[in-house]
Amino acid sequence: QSALTQPASVSGSPGQSITISCTGTSSDVGSYDLVSWYQQHPGKAPKLMIYEGSKRPSGVSNRFSGSKSGNTASLTISGLQADDEADYYCCSYAVSNNYVFGTGTKVTVL
Amino acid sequence: QITLKESGPTLVKPTQTLTLTCAFSGFSLSTSGVGVAWIRQPPGKALDWLAVIYWDDDKRYSPSLKSRLTITKDTSKNQVVLRMTNMDPVDTATYYCAHRASYFGFDPWGQGTLVTVSS
């Protein structure tokens, strides 16, 4: 299985909204509403931000939201803040009960 | 509070077998729906899912690495072990273990352990 495709970088000014896409295939993103999103600051372990496509774990800001259309999932960050600057990865459940991660997106707050 | 911590060698030689241990607390691997996964990240690169083991001993592996990986659990010790054979310099990475709850997400993650493959 191939890695899910994400844009290498996305940027925005404080207060703006940005959207990160995650494109897979009918064998992963397209077949399951089971995409999760992770935030990773430099030198730190990833942190779960969204699970099962659009659900937020307890403690995660409601500025983070997830959605899906066809084979593409998306993460939207609204009201962009300086601390949102990090790498973001999507991950999808896939056929044969496997998982596949995305290529990663660096978010820069201008 | 759920915590996980990886341990193992920091340096392995090419062709050797890597054995990593994930020691966890705050949950039981005998609880229905729960799993522990291993994910790695080469320096400066993306996350790469390796394997997962579930409460019922179901095991799943990355198709590209399946022949080299073995994941096992010791429920009484709250540990999960990953073995990767025939290590190569391209396997140099930070290796993470993570809790997979009954919902589909890896949360939380351990701090990670950097493994370097070099002669």
Image (cartoon, helix red, strand yellow):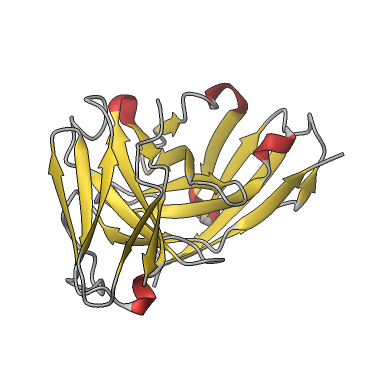
Residue A40 in the image, given as x and y percentages of width and height = 44, 62
Identify the image quadrant of residue A59. bottom left
Q: Is residue B111 left or right of residue A36?
A: right
Who is closer to the viewer here, B33 or B14? B14
Going by the picture, which residue comes out furthest to the right? B119
Which is nearer the eye, A45 or B103?
A: A45
Dividing the picture into quadrants, the one containing residue B27 is: bottom left
| Looking at the image, residue B19 lies above or below residue B112 | above
Give me the residue at 39% from left, 69% from top.
Answer: A85
From this viewpoint, which residue is outermost toward the top?
A: B67
Nearer to the camera, B85 or B57:
B85
Quarter holding the C terminus of chain B?
Answer: top right
| Residue A79 location (% of width, % of height) | 20, 75
Which residue shows up at 22% across the image and 73% down it?
A61
Residue in the picture at 58% in, 21% down: B67
Q: Look at 70% across and 49% down and name the residue there.
A: B115
Q: Nearer the viewer, residue A14 or A58?
A: A14
Residue A30's place in the image compared with B74, above or below, is: above
Evaluate whether residue B97 shows in this view: yes
Residue B101 visible in the snapshot: no
Q: Position of residue A71 (x, y in %)?
A: 19, 33
- Residue A18: percent from the left, percent from the top? 23, 61
Image mark count: 0
Quarter of the image where the N terminus of chain B is located: bottom left
